[in-house]
Image (cartoon, rainbow, N blue to C red):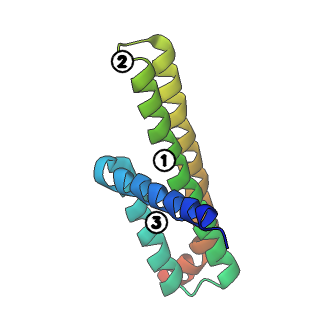
Amino acid sequence: MNVRPLTRIVRSFRFAGEGVTYLLRTQPNFWVHCLAAAVVIVFAMALGAPAAEAGVLILAIGLVLACEAFNSAIEAVVDLASPDYDPLAKIAKDTAAAAVLLVAFAAAMVGLLVLGPRLLVRLVP
């Protein structure tokens, strides 16, 4: 068995872990999304969401977190390429942030569609 491919795979996971650590250490919006994800997961468990619905929620959460990571990466690259103010750099950063907003909104709608009816049944006598 060749060790090199395995070493590369392990290194790739380590680098990805460093990326998650960076996001957790430095990106307040990532924390906000993680907190929202935790709340959704607690509600899904408390309301007894079936596995398929929980899977949809987890996919939506993953998309939001991944989009936030892409946004942070784009911001870092833009800052590196254009340390001074540039209108095109602003457009790149703003549209990357808009992508996060759009995905987060869609995820919130998924959460309402999946958990809303169960929550409503418990809240309305």
Three-letter code, disc 2: Pro
* Residue 8 in view, yes or no: yes
Residue behind mark 3: 37
User: Looking at the picture, how far across and down is residue 3, in whole percent?
Assistant: 59, 67
Which element carries disc 2, helix, strand or loop?
A: loop
Pick the residue in front: 110 or 19. 19
User: Mark 1: which secondary structure?
Assistant: helix
Q: Mark 3 is on which residue type?
A: Ala
Circle 2 crowding by C-alpha within 10 Å: few under 14, some 14–19, many from 20: few
Give the answer, above or below, for where 54 lies relative to 50. Answer: above
Q: Is residue 43 left or right of residue 110?
A: left
The residue mark sitting in front, 2 or 3, is: 2
Q: Residues within 10 Å of mark 1 (few under 14, many from 20)?
A: many
Q: Are marks 3 and 1 in contact (CB under 8 Å)?
A: no
Q: Nearer the viewer, residue 101 or 1?
A: 1
Contact between marks 2 and 3 (CB within 8 A): the answer is no
Q: What is the C-alpha distance between the residues marked 2 and 3?
A: 33 Å
